[in-house]
Image (cartoon, rainbow, N blue to C red):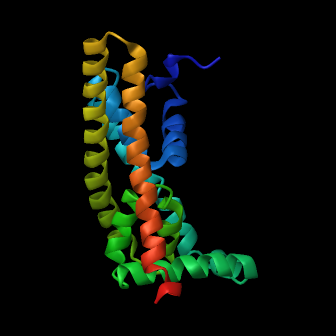
Amino acid sequence: MIGLEILDPFNPWFLPLVLLITFVIGDNIFLVLGFGFSQGYSDIWFLIVFFVAIVLTDYPFYLIGRSKKFKKLKKIKIIKKIFGRVDETLDFITGNHVNLAFFYCKFISGAKPWINIYLGEKRVSQKRFIVMTLIAAIVWSLFAFLIGYISGQGFTFVWGYFESLSIAVFFLLVILALFFKSTKKTKEYIHSKYSPSKK
């Protein structure tokens, strides 16, 4: 059974676990870290490690988009249709200003793989990709961390005020539901208003 010792930075499984978590959860991990920080379960070391991880997990998708094999893969009808729609939509909503795509990648949940592949297809230079990814990651990490931290402070206050863990957990779930609903609404708005088919 996996114990908390796996979270020890000197554990050989620590870094693979961090990369796996950020790959699955994405940049929203900073919501969890912000909450954990407010409860004393996280520290600066964890924030730095996870920040590096969210930047590193963008890179493989970018390389996929740049690869010659991906170009061949896109000749398959179904894949060509899917990524053709993705490319057209991103071209339209960004006005072909790829720098905007870096920020969409962070602020819209679930967009990470698609947008980074798109950036690779656009032949964005590696230097530009790294710099813009870092800038977008800093902005998003701070935003998500603050939401998580404030939620954690609210959780502690509600628990202490009502002396009920159930009410405190309900408060936290409402905050998280509102956050994810807002990102979902953002995606729906972009799709309905800026989809190429609406032009």
Front residue of 11 and 104: 104
Q: Residue 185 is drawn in which quadrant? A: bottom left
Front residue of 93 and 173: 173
Q: Whole-percent x and y of residue 188? A: 47, 65
Q: Is residue 5 above or below residue 23?
A: above
Picture quarter with the N terminus: top right
Query: Residue at the location (50% across, 31% down)?
Result: 14
Front residue of 134 and 79: 79
Residue 135 visible in the displayed image: yes
Question: With 113 as the anchor, is 150 left or right in this view?
Answer: left
Query: Residue at the location (40% across, 39% down)?
Result: 176
Residue found at the very far bottom of the displayed protein: 199
Q: Whole-percent x and y of residue 4? A: 50, 18
Q: Whole-percent x and y of residue 126? A: 40, 70
Q: Whole-percent x and y of residue 43? A: 29, 27
Q: Is residue 71 above or below residue 9?
A: below
Residue found at the very far top of the displayed protein: 163
Q: Is residue 23 above or below residue 74?
A: above
Query: Residue at the location (54% across, 38% down)?
Result: 16
